[in-house]
Image (cartoon, rainbow, N blue to C red):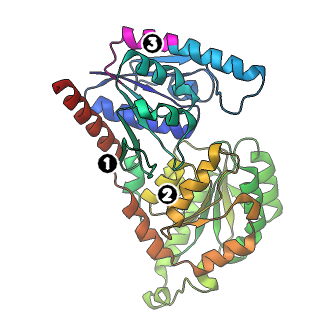
């Protein structure tokens, strides 16, 4: 059996494409990838051995284009549909699996035109434009959020098993992770600097993904505040040292800790430091060390934090298409499973108030109940079931 996996542009789409491809290979399904020369597709998969063949077509997004740019974008998509159609035919593709994004336009549309079964995975709580257009033609739309579609199938989000294996209940905040996404987030970075002196007084360590563009500035600013900007090895050793000191406290002392008072941000007094980095593909190691996270609300990040039992305070990227990050976080907020604030309303006082009132251990324990570790297998199993029913008719 042969599948074409398509879509991408950003890490959120591409991480799902990778997870689904790996699951297909486990089941003996041959995979090819059809993406775009724009975005991050080529960087992710050009040298990857996951796919038998990789194709990167000249496409760009159509949404939000104006004037002549929209005509060029449409022309490129039409040309990509024609090229993708030939690729699907040459590889005798049995079904197309789209993870959305403008990269998916060519292959997803070509599958519909050629009568090849199309399956869609929608990562966000607010369906993307391309997925919305193509969803009526798809055999099924998979999502971890309720999209209100007749052909939707709710499944767990495809997450790397390592996030589940490293999960633990957080009971005390000793390390905070600031997670701005692969490109960083200037507003989140500035908020971290504003909050840092308070964390410094509490002896709390900081792990901070700040993005490449802001790395030099952030290093300088943290040093001005008296933080030691540690390399990864230094930070790992420091974290282990802190944990050993905490564990050496008497059981009676540990029981006296109260998360509903100012002690919510207390930590063993230490020389505070920050593990500052632009981006790390092995983010699970950072998440494992953290006790709380301040993050954007991309779908992959949100569900990875859930899988690891890591409570979070979400600051959605305000310019995300259709404000989908806000709706992602809102789905958890309605269940009292996260903090949520718009970037325009972000302030230190509200954050500290949230932390002070938070039942950290309870929220940490409840998060993992929202997701199971077999989301990828659920999706591929369901696709094969639908195809078997189709072929038996």
Q: Looking at the image, can residue 204 be seen?
A: yes
Mark carried by residue 305: 2
In the orientation shown, which residue stands out farthest toward the right? 224
Q: Residues within 10 Å of mark 1 (few under 14, many from 20)?
A: some
Q: Nearer the viewer, mark 3 or mark 1?
A: 3
Towards the viewer: 126 or 32: 126
Q: Look at mark 1 in the image and give the residue it sits on.
A: 374
Marks 3 & 2, CB-CB < 8 Å contact = no
Residue tagged 3: 85
Q: Nearer the viewer, residue 150 or 258?
A: 150
Mark 1 to mark 2 CA distance (whole Å) = 16 Å
| Residues shaded magenta | 82-95
Q: Quadrant of the N terminus?
A: top left
**Residue at left offset 43%, top offset 34%:** 136
Residue 266 is situated, as x and y percent measured from the top left of the image, at 62, 79
When the figure is inspected, residue 257 is found, relative to residue 273, above or below; the finding is below
The answer to whether residue 266 shows anywhere in this view is no
Residue 290 percent location from the top left of the image: 54, 62
Does the stretch in magenta take in 88? yes
Q: Which residue is painted at 40% across and 60% down in the image? A: 370
Q: Is residue 317 left or right of residue 336?
A: right
Using the image as rendered, state which of residue 335 and residue 256 is in the foreground: 335
């Amino acid at each position: 059996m042969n599948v074409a996996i398509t879509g991408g542009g950003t890490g959120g789409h591409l991480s799902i494409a990778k997870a689904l491809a790996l699951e297909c290979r486990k089941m003996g399904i041959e995979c090819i990838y059809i993406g775009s020369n724009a975005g991050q597709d080529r960087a992710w998969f050009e040298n990857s051995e996951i796919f038998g063949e990789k194709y990167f077509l000249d496409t760009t997004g159509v949404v939000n284009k104006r004037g002549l740019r929209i005509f060029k974008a449409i022309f490129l998509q039409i040309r990509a549909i024609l090229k993708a159609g030939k690729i699907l035919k040459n590889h005798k593709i049995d079904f197309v699996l789209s993870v959305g994004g403008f990269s998916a336009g060519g292959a997803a549309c070509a599958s519909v035109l050629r009568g090849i079964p199309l399956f869609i995975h929608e990562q966000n709580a607010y369906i993307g434009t391309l997925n919305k257009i193509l969803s009526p033609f798809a055999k099924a739309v998979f999502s971890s959020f309720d999209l209100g579609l007749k052909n939707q199938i709710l499944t767990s989000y495809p997450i790397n098993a390592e996030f589940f294996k490293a999960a633990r209940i957080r009971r005390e905040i000793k390390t905070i992770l600031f997670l701005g996404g692969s490109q960083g987030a200037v507003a989140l970075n500035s908020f971290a600097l504003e909050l840092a002196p308070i964390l410094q007084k509490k002896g709390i360590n900081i792990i901070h993904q700040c993005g490449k563009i802001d790395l030099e500035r952030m290093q300088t600013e943290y040093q001005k505040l008296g933080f030691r900007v540690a390399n990864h090895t230094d930070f790992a050793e420091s974290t282990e040292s802190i944990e050993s000191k905490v564990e050496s406290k008497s059981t009676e002392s540990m029981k006296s800790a109260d998360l509903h008072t100012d002690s919510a941000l207390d930590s063993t007094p230490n020389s505070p430091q920050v593990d500052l980095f632009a981006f790390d593909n092995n983010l699970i190691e950072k998440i494992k060390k953290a006790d709380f996270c301040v993050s954007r609300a991309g779908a992959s990040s949100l569900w990875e934090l859930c899988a690891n039992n890591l409570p979070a305070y979400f600051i959605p990227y305000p310019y995300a298409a259709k404000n989908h990050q806000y709706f992602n976080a809102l789905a958890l907020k309605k269940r009292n499973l996260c903090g949520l604030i718009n970037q325009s309303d972000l302030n230190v006082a509200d954050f500290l108030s949230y932390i002070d009132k938070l039942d950290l251990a309870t929220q940490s324990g409840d998060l993992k109940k929202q997701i199971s570790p077999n989301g990828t297998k659920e999706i591929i199993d369901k696709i094969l079931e639908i195809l078997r029913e189709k072929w038996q008719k």
